[in-house]
Amino acid sequence: MKIFILYTISALVIFVVNFMIYNISFNIQATPYLSEEQRVDSGILMLKTTMPAYLIFSILVALSFYLIAKLTNKKHMLTKSSSGR
């Protein structure tokens, strides 16, 4: 359970960092050139497309870290047991 919580937290951190980078860069680059209606439209579009994409990406990254750690641990255990230690 502790490992699940650790990887869930890492997925959330990855999601927040990705979204903050996108949001800050969007606000710096595009916001000064948009009208209020365009800002609202782009915000809604961001909620529909960007946030789910970043959430899926963060889950996939956390899952890949979990699988790599699991495979690395198995290989380490195999080499440890075959060496007789």
Image (cartoon, grey):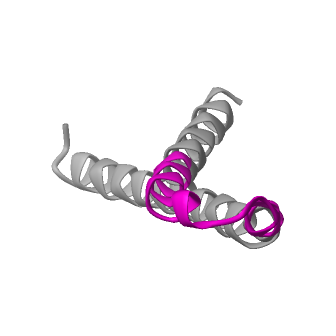
Which one is nearer the viewer's eye here, 39 or 55?
39
Assign the C terminus to one quadrant of the image.
Answer: top left
Please state the total of marks drawn on the protein image: 0
Q: Is 26 on the left-hand or right-hand side of 53?
A: left
Q: Looking at the image, which residue is at 74% across and 65% down?
A: 52
Residue 33 magenta-highlighted: yes
Which one is nearer the viewer's eye here, 44 or 49?
44
Assign the N terminus to one quadrant of the image.
Answer: top right
Percent coordinates x, y for residue 60 in the rendering: 59, 65
Above or below, 66 against 7 in this view is below
Q: Looking at the image, which residue is at 64% across and 26% down?
A: 2
Q: Looking at the image, which residue is at 63% across and 58% down?
A: 59
Which one is nearer the viewer's eye here, 68 or 29?
29
Q: Is 20 on the left-hand or right-hand side of 40?
A: left
Percent coordinates x, y for residue 78 in the rendering: 31, 56
Residue 60 magenta-highlighted: no
Q: Is 33 on the left-hand or right-hand side of 83?
A: right
Above or below, 28 against 53 in this view is above
Percent coordinates x, y for residue 24 in the rendering: 49, 48
Above or below, 48 against 1 in this view is below
Q: Looking at the image, which residue is at 52% across and 47% down?
A: 14
Q: Which residues are magenta?
A: 20-44
Tell me which corner region of the image, top left, top right, bottom left or bottom right, holds residue 55: bottom right
Which one is nearer the viewer's eye here, 70 or 56?
56
